[in-house]
Image (cartoon, rainbow, N blue to C red):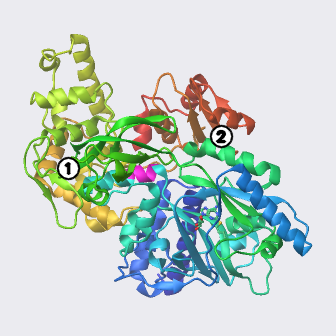
């Protein structure tokens, strides 16, 4: 193969993969199947390995990171990054408008009262710099004058475009010589839960809220670590721009935002230009929708839309006079910390939990809050009997913010974290560099319980009717020591158990047997509970390995060649299969016929079905299946489940007691399906509950 031909193919592959990343991560509207994407990705990796001279730090394969810095360097911003003034009430918003109007009147400039409104993202402010259309670096806001250079880490953020030129070409915009894009890096709630779950299992740092998780993930010296963190960037404006002699025609902030979106930058769909009268209703509506958004916001930002007026209004020492943040009130309350409980997780991590006097926060009664680990309790000096401030940000797990020390009882004693496992009494260990204490007794009943409960849960094999209570009593009776034991149970074994009538014993055995026969490889991989391997990674793995033996034999190189699998995940998979007990478990699965084999993907899976590429959303309760199952069926048939109502939504499936999504979808003219119509559509697409297996692993 000639050098030139390889170089051309390499360029083409990079551009294609950038484009598909954009479809997937920015537009949330992929054009190709995962398998086709993987093929491109692997071809690029192979070509890059053969041609080190064609290296490019902005190749899509570089999103996995790898550079380790001794420390961050600070760098000045070309243009200062200001902060924003806040308005907590409608009166304060009106004052802002009056101040702006007065200033403009003094200058004799007419006030065109159009405003750009968008969410106030609760994350970490960033400036991303593009030179000649190519990613050239990123700085945190810092003190506004100088920030930290986080270039290597931000390169790993999947929805940050690394090359604007193809977007400029497609949209007819000039390629800027210099473009400083400003925005906020956040973590979605879902990603935050999943990250914390993984961190907890590994004894790593557990984050108090999505903002801390986002900030902590950007500020990592090892960019390979940042790369494993699920970060999302949202653009809200620009710093310095230089288009040379070309004119992008940006006269308003709305124009800038449209232009940035056309250049491939992620712009949240919630932003829009409104009249003065529409601003406060937008703020109120956003407050009501807050929980439905996939990410946390703490208010709304309002900017005068005209850039000429922005220049006229200018800045105070601290903040622009043309923009203001309308903030939501924080949901905080004081309550008593009655006790600190310690729970043992699936991987043995001891997690402290605050037991609270029940208190209502934003309409939800809160009686427990996770305390993460020993250091967290020490740092906050929490003691049983204390009065504490609890906060609920969005719908995120409530957190204990601080102690009200003035109210501390005189006899409150400093908390001592237990150094023995509260479940089995064996000594716990805290490894060097880890935040967590762990029980390392592999036979610890709490660990067995959690591990098996996870195996049968929705995240795992989803064995119907096999509740946690049953798992617990089967383990306590010594009848189940590993997940494989579940499959050997007979009705005769079960009937003597308390509360187990013959009928339910039969159902139980049938459910377990059905799970064995219907298990898909991706479900089984997920069920193993390998650290860092959730549903999504399990699906990627099942797409590449035919069975558990093949996965167990995979080298770190083979694993990291797959998209989204970095060195840490690969190491954790290797560690799992390197363990004798785990290998014995896998061997038993094979013996008992719990052995799904993935067939190679057909050329056009699902793409020919009626649901291919269709976007779905659910509201209310479906009579006959869980949301998870409905989502699985939609995905298996080639459709997608999205998180919010928009014009792009194809179907809203409305079950019993639908929420506010229904009215919104109706207003936007989105097709509404009853549960019956949804079933009919699935049946037409060939997706029935029975055939789910073939669709999923096909
Ligand atoms: S505009 C000159 N828009 O809020 C005005 N800021 O409190 C620049 N923020 O550090 C800010 N969402 O990082 C703007 N939609 C949004 C925002 C936003 C979040 C952050 C921003 C800034 C902070 C100021």
Question: Magenta span has 140?
Answer: no
- Start and end of the magenta stretch? 190-194
First in sequence: mark 2 vs mark 1: 1
Front-most of 89 and 263? 89
At which x and y percent is residue 280?
A: 73, 49
Structural distance between the alpha carbons of marks 2 and 1: 58 Å
Residue drawn 67% across the image and 73% down it: 238
The quarter of the rendered structure image containing the C terminus is top left
Q: Residue 189 carries which label?
A: none
Quadrant of ligand 1: it is bottom right
Task: Using a 10 Å C-alpha cutoff, classify the residue at mark 2 as few (fewer than 14 neighbours), some (14 to 19) or many (20 or more).
Answer: many
Residue at the limit of the structure toward the left, as seen here: 426
Q: Can residue 531 be seen in this view?
A: no
The residue that label 2 is drawn on is 650
Residue 130: x, y in percent?
61, 79
Residue 513 image offset from top left, x and y in percent: 26, 27
When the figure is inspected, residue 661 is found, relative to residue 353, above or below; the finding is above
Q: Is label 1's Cβ within 8 Å of ligand 1?
A: no
The answer to whether residue 193 is magenta is yes
Mark 1 lies on a secondary structure that is loop
Q: Position of residue 279 (x, y in %)?
A: 75, 51
The residue singled out by tag 1 in the image is: 413
- At a point 25% along the width and 63% down the height, the residue shown is 571
Tell which of 274 and 105 is nearer to you: 105
Mark 2 residue element: loop
- Neighbour tally class for label 1: few under 14, some 14-19, many 20 plus, Cα within 10 Å: few
- Does 457 appear above or below 198? above
Vertical comparison of 325 with 338: above or below: below
> What's the residue at 45%, 56% (across, down)?
210
From this viewpoint, is residue 31 visible?
yes
């Amino acid at each position: 193969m000639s050098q030139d031909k390889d170089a051309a193919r390499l360029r083409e592959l990079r551009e294609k993969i950038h484009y598909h990343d954009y479809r997937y991560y920015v537009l949330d509207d992929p054009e190709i199947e995962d398998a086709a994407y993987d093929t491109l990705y692997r071809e690029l990796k192979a070509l890059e390995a053969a041609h080190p001279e064609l290296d490019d730090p902005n190749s899509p394969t570089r999103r996995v990171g790898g550079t380790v810095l001794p420390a961050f360097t600070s760098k000045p911003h070309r243009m200062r990054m200001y902060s924003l003034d806040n308005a907590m009430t409608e009166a304060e918003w009106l004052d802002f408008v009056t101040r702006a109007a007065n200033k403009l009147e003094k200058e004799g400039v007419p006030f065109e009262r159009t405003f750009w409104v968008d969410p106030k993202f609760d994350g970490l402010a960033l400036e991303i710099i593009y030179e000649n259309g190519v990613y050239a670096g990123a700085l945190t806001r810092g003190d506004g004058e100088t920030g930290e250079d986080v270039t290597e880490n931000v390169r790993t953020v999947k929805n940050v475009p690394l090359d604007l030129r193809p977007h400029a070409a497609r949209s007819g915009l000039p390629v800027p010589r210099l473009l400083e894009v400003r925005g906020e890096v956040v973590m979605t709630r879902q990603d935050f839960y999943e990250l914390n779950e993984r961190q907890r299992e590994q004894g790593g740092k557990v984050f108090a809220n999505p903002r801390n998780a986002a900030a902590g993930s950007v500020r990592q010296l090892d960019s390979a670590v940042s790369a494993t963190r699920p970060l999302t960037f949202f653009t809200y404006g620009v710093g310095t721009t230089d288009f040379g002699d070309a004119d992008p025609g940006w006269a308003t902030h709305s124009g800038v935002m449209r232009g940035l979106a056309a250049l491939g930058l992620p712009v949240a769909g919630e932003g829009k230009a409104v009249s003065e009268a529409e601003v406060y209703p937008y703020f109120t509506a956003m407050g009501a929708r807050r929980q439905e958004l996939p990410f946390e916001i703490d208010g709304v930002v309002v900017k005068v839309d005209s850039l000429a007026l922005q220049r006229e209004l200018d800045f105070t020492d601290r903040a622009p006079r043309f923009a203001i943040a309308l903030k939501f009130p924080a949901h905080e309350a004081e309550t008593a910390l009655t006790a600190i409980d310690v729970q043992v997780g699936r991987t043995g991590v001891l997690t402290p939990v605050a037991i609270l006097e029940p208190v209502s926060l934003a309409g939800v009664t809160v009686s427990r809050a996770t305390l993460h680990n020993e250091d967290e309790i020490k740092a906050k000096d929490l003691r049983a009997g204390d009065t504490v401030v609890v906060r609920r940000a969005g719908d995120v797990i409530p957190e204990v913010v601080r102690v009200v020390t003035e109210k501390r009882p005189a006899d409150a004693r400093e908390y001592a974290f237990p150094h023995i496992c509260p479940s089995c009494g064996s000594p716990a260990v805290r490894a060097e560099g880890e935040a967590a204490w762990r029980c390392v007794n592999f036979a610890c009943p709490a660990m067995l319980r959690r591990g098996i409960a996870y195996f049968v849960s929705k995240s795992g094999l989803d064995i119907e009717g096999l509740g946690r209570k049953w798992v617990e009593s089967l383990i306590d009776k010594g009848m189940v020591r590993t997940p494989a034991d579940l499959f050997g149970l007979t009705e005769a074994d079960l009937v003597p158990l308390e509360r187990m009538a013959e009928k339910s014993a039969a159902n139980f055995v049938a459910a377990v047997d059905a799970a064995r026969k219907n298990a898909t490889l991706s479900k089984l991989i997920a069920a193993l509970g390998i650290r860092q391997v959730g549903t999504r990674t399990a699906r990627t793995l099942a797409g590449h390995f035919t069975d558990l033996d093949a996965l167990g034999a995979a080298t770190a190189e083979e694993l990291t060649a797959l998209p989204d699998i970095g060195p840490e995940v690969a190491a954790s998979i290797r560690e799992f299969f390197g363990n004798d007990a785990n290998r014995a478990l896998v061997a038993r699965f094979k013996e008992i016929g719990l052995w799904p084999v993935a067939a190679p993907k057909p050329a056009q899976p699902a793409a020919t079905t009626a649901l291919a590429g269709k976007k779905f959303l659910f509201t209310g309760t479906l009579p006959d299946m869980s949301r998870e199952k409905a989502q699985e069926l939609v995905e298996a048939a080639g459709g997608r489940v999205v998180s919010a109502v928009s014009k792009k939504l194809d179907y809203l499936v409305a079950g019993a007691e639908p929420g506010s999504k229904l009215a919104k979808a109706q207003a936007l003219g989105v097709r509404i399906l009853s549960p019956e119509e949804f079933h009919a559509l699935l049946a037409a697409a060939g997706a029935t509950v029975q055939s789910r297996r073939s669709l999923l692993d096909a």
